[in-house]
Image (cartoon, rainbow, N blue to C red):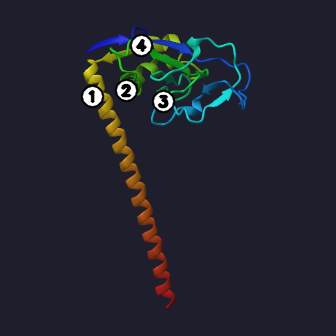
Amino acid sequence: MHTAIIKDIATVQTGYSFRSRLEASENGNVAVIQMKDLLDDNRVDCSRLIEIDMHTLKEQHFARIGDLVFRSRGQANTSAIILQNPGKAIIAAPLLRIRIKNPENVLPEYLNWYISQADAQRYLTSVQAGTSVNMIRSTQLEQMPVHLPSLKMQKSIVELAALSAREQMILSALAEKRERYISTLLVQLAKEDKNDEES
């Protein structure tokens, strides 16, 4: 394992700054990835992106599969990964785009996972300290250290993390069902007890 900084392994680009509020267009030619499109499980939902009219964009502005979208502002400084083809889509500021330089050395899924871990979060909290708007600048993100195991180990970590997340979802769903079942049962008991009193 060795340690690198994000700047060594990826490029960080600031999201596109819009001067006015985004207005969706029926015949829009460019989709826009916004904060609301980043899911809780750190994936980007590309199914409901708004589309706008823009004709001045260069190829470098467009997002693609494997890009990470970093939440640079707010309490949760984590990223989300694009796993489905976003088409012609750009990322809106204040989000940042992280693009791995060489996927043969670093898996985008691994970096996406790593950014949520304690070491990375400690670094991000430390550079955010003292700012009134809770914002991470692209230059600060570029300096974040990343522990890089072998590609094989990165794959294993990503797979185990996905299994663990799935397990948590199943356990959460089970707990919710159990709670509903017990609640229904208790309400039934309450009703029966009332009927007993009346009879």
What mark, if any, has residue 94 been given in the picture? none
Q: Which residue is painted at 39% across and 25% down in the image?
A: 109
Marks 1/3: CA distance? 22 Å
| Image location (x, y in percent) of residue 76 | 50, 29
Q: What element carries label 1?
A: helix
Q: Which residue is painted at 46% across and 81% down in the image?
A: 193
- Label 4 sits on residue: 6
User: Measured along the vertical axis of the image, is residue 189 above or below residue 147?
Assistant: below
Marks 4/2: CA distance? 16 Å
Counting residues from the start of the chain, the first of labels 2 and 3 encountered is 3
Within 10 Å of disc 1 (Cα), the crowding (few <14, some 14-19, many 20+) is few
Counting residues from the start of the chain, the first of labels 1 and 3 encountered is 3
User: Measured along the vertical axis of the image, is residue 42 above or below residue 18?
Assistant: below
- Indicate which label's residue lies in the foreground, 4 or 1: 1
Quarter occupied by residue 177: bottom left
Q: Is mark 2 on a helix, strand or loop?
A: helix
- Mark 3 and mark 2 in contact (Cβ < 8 Å)? no
User: Measured along the vertical axis of the image, is residue 142 above or below residue 135?
Assistant: above
- Mark 1 and mark 4 in contact (Cβ < 8 Å)? no
Counting residues from the start of the chain, the first of labels 1 and 2 encountered is 2
Which amino acid type is marked by label 2?
Answer: Ala
Marks 4/3: CA distance? 23 Å
Query: In the depicted view, which residue is nearer to us: 21 or 71?
Result: 21
Which amino acid type is marked by label 1?
Answer: Ser
| Image location (x, y in percent) of residue 125 | 46, 22
- Label 1 sits on residue: 156
- Indicate which label's residue lies in the foreground, 2 or 3: 3
Counting residues from the start of the chain, the first of labels 4 and 3 encountered is 4
